Image (cartoon, helix red, strand yellow):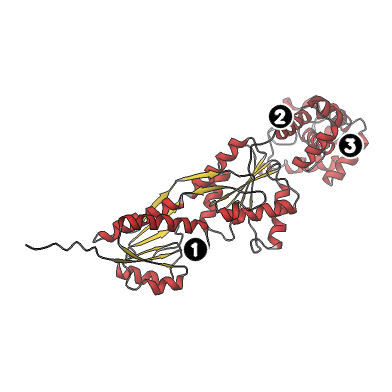
Amino acid sequence: MKTMNTTRKIRSVAVAVKLSDASWRDFLMGFFDYAKRETHWDIRVVQSADELQRAVSGCQGVVTGIEPDRKTQALLAKAGTPLVAIGSEWKLAKKSHAVCIRNDNEDIGRFCAQHFQMLGKFASAGFVHSNKDDDWSAARERGFLGSFRDIEKSTFRSDAEPGSDKDIAALAEWLKSLSKPAAVMAAWDMRAVHVLRACRLARQKVPGQIAVIGVDNDPLLCDFSTPPLTSVAPDHMLEGQLAADTLNRMMRRRTTPTVAHILNTAKKIEERESAKPISPVTSLIARAVAFISANAEKNIKVSDVADALGVSRSLLDLRFREFRNETISKAITRTRLESVKRLLSDTGLSIRAISAKCGFANPNHLKNLFKRHFGKSMREWRANIRQDCSTQENVKTEHCLYCPQFTARDQPLGRSPAQASANL
């Protein structure tokens, strides 16, 4: 009676990842967990493209999160060696038999935005890129900023070395420019740590003025940052198991698929102190801004705003400076001046009438204030608007007094453009 040989063939597998990153260590845990249960592999872990080139000779399968050089890719393609490329943005050699597995980076961005939106209403959203023009970073930005509506959106890229003094200084200035409260997503955890450093330099409170979320959930970075960092945690262990299962299937077949792509969408949020629900202060600021917008033309004062909200003037002024980077008095003046600009372009009102309508008792005071803020007199500003709107190529709006679409029946108070200019 013939005895069947049940000895399983040992296959040599090379895995190229950077063990310095927590995400790759989690990936390997998932990879080894699957390999122990389902395969009989001799696994060699390498950490550079050079090591990978030396390791591929004689391998029956390769998994890599590091881009192989052209020689290594050509060697793998010629041998028909099954290849699982993790998070690949590089072009595979022709005739490669490969499967690309990556996280759904746009969805990671959307997922982060959804978490911020659950925390409350933010005045702005900002995205901080990685150290290079990485495709995965750009995809996270698209998903994140594309999920917000009706708020300011901004992106930060640095020409300096990430984490350098120059980079942190530029990042601090960018953070100060954001309307508060601001929701900031960093491309990955180390970049989020840089954001927290820049917040301290810029004296921006976290999470009071700026809430910060990173990606990868590296405990060493997240738990020991100041404050501890909230992070999106893609399921890297599942990604490792998926890579091992995919490679196992490819190695068991006589033919392997031409390049295919698999998305890993599993993720969760690990909440820490850098992103918390928005405090009632935010609501207070929003109410103050709404009151100013509705009443600025009534010659209101700072005390009127505080009385309307039922809080002390000193507290309101303090919170306003923290979240808006301006005083209540400046906010009132700015709102009035915007109304002045609108009336200059949309009506034929005289300067005296505009002064009264916008809450300025002294027309000369308004003239001086306007020129100090905008670098032009009211007469010059209106004349420029008239000149800009005199050609079809630079039409402003159908409501602008000087636009070609403006008709006689629309003219306020029966004044023509020439009369309006004369009144200045």
Q: Is residue 72 visible?
A: yes
Q: Is residue 9 above or below residue 237?
A: below
- Per the image, the residue denoted by label 1 is 19
- CA gap, disc 1 and disc 2: 71 Å
Residues tagged 3 and 2 counted as in contact (Cβ below 8 A): no
The local secondary structure at tag 3 comes to helix
- Per the image, the residue denoted by label 3 is 366
Does residue 14 appear to the left or right of 189 in the view shown? left
For marks 1 and 2 on the same chain, the one whose residue lies earlier in the sequence: 1
Q: How many marks?
A: 3
- CA gap, disc 3 and disc 1: 64 Å
The local secondary structure at tag 1 comes to loop
Does residue 308 appear to the left or right of 151 in the view shown? right
- Residue 171 percent coordinates (x, y): 69, 55
Q: Amino acid at mark 2?
A: Thr
Label placed on residue 407: 2
- CA gap, disc 3 and disc 2: 29 Å
For marks 3 and 2 on the same chain, the one whose residue lies earlier in the sequence: 3
